[in-house]
Amino acid sequence: MYPVVLGPGESVTRVFHAAMAQPQHNAAANGGSLNVHRSSAAGGLPQAALQGRGGGLQVSGHAGVSILADQTANGSRLAVVSAFWAPAASLHTDRAALASVGACFRPGHGTPFLVVRDPFVTYSITPGLRVASESQDGIDIFAPSNKAGANYFNAGVPPKLGGSFRGGAALALLPHDRRDHHQDAPHRPVPHRRRPERHPRALR
């Protein structure tokens, strides 16, 4: 599936041809082939019958394009090129399910990440998550109602590296449920045990 914003003067046919070149390239790179037999569907939109070979099997399929309204800074229409193929013997049975994947595509509004800058590190989290505590050595982040959480912490310098370590702190992620730990004081920071610094603040 290849969604493309149609800018001013952009041709749907050109987008379709460019999109179909990619699966053809991928098939050839893996020792197979994919032939695209182009035609026009109702309304003049491009479509194609697909035939090829991969993994020792003959495959067949179909490619088409749909146009969706999607107002963006670069255009107001979205061309969605979708293609599917399967072993020729099973295409009749699987065709409806394969076609439904491209048919269900719709643009949607994404949720941006929240960028947090503090005296120690800069990081991004999903809006709604809460930073319970942080220090130069670690960060505790929890979901609403403390239903889940994660700890990011500086695990220190591996002993065998000695003084030659020049950057890149070791990090560990420990997802867990911390409701019992914070249920009485959900906004109280959890103190971290400070260790002597043996290298620059590599979390920066």
Image (cartoon, rainbow, N blue to C red):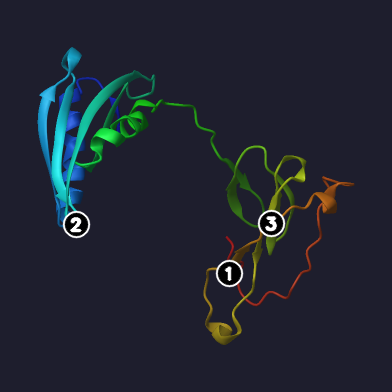
Please report whichever mark, 1 or 3, sits nearer to the chain's N-terminal start: 3
Amino acid carrying mark 1 in the image: Ala
Q: Which residue is mark 3?
A: 139
In the rendered image, the quadrant that contains the C terminus is: bottom right
Distance of mark 2 from mark 3, alpha carbons?
Answer: 44 Å
Q: Residues within 10 Å of mark 2 (few under 14, many from 20)?
A: few
Q: Which residue is mark 2?
A: 30
Distance of mark 2 from mark 1, alpha carbons?
Answer: 37 Å
Q: Which residue is mark 1?
A: 170
122 shown above or below 161: above
Residue 84 in view of the camera = no
Distance of mark 1 from mark 3, alpha carbons?
Answer: 14 Å
From the top left corner, tell me how far across and down residue 3 is, in percent: 31, 31
Give the residue at x 62% y 45%. 116
Give the residue at x 20% y 30%. 15
108 shown above or below 193: above
Query: Tags 1 and 3 in contact by the CB under 8 Å rule?
Result: no
From the top left corner, tell me how far across and down residue 142 is, in percent: 71, 48
Give the residue at x 68% y 64%. 137
Amino acid carrying mark 2 in the image: Asn
Q: Can you name the residue that lies furthest to the right here?
A: 184
Q: Where is residue 152, by image quadrant?
A: bottom right
From the top left corner, tell me how far across and down residue 55 is, in percent: 20, 55
Query: Tags 2 and 1 in contact by the CB under 8 Å rule?
Result: no
Q: Which mark is residue 84?
A: none
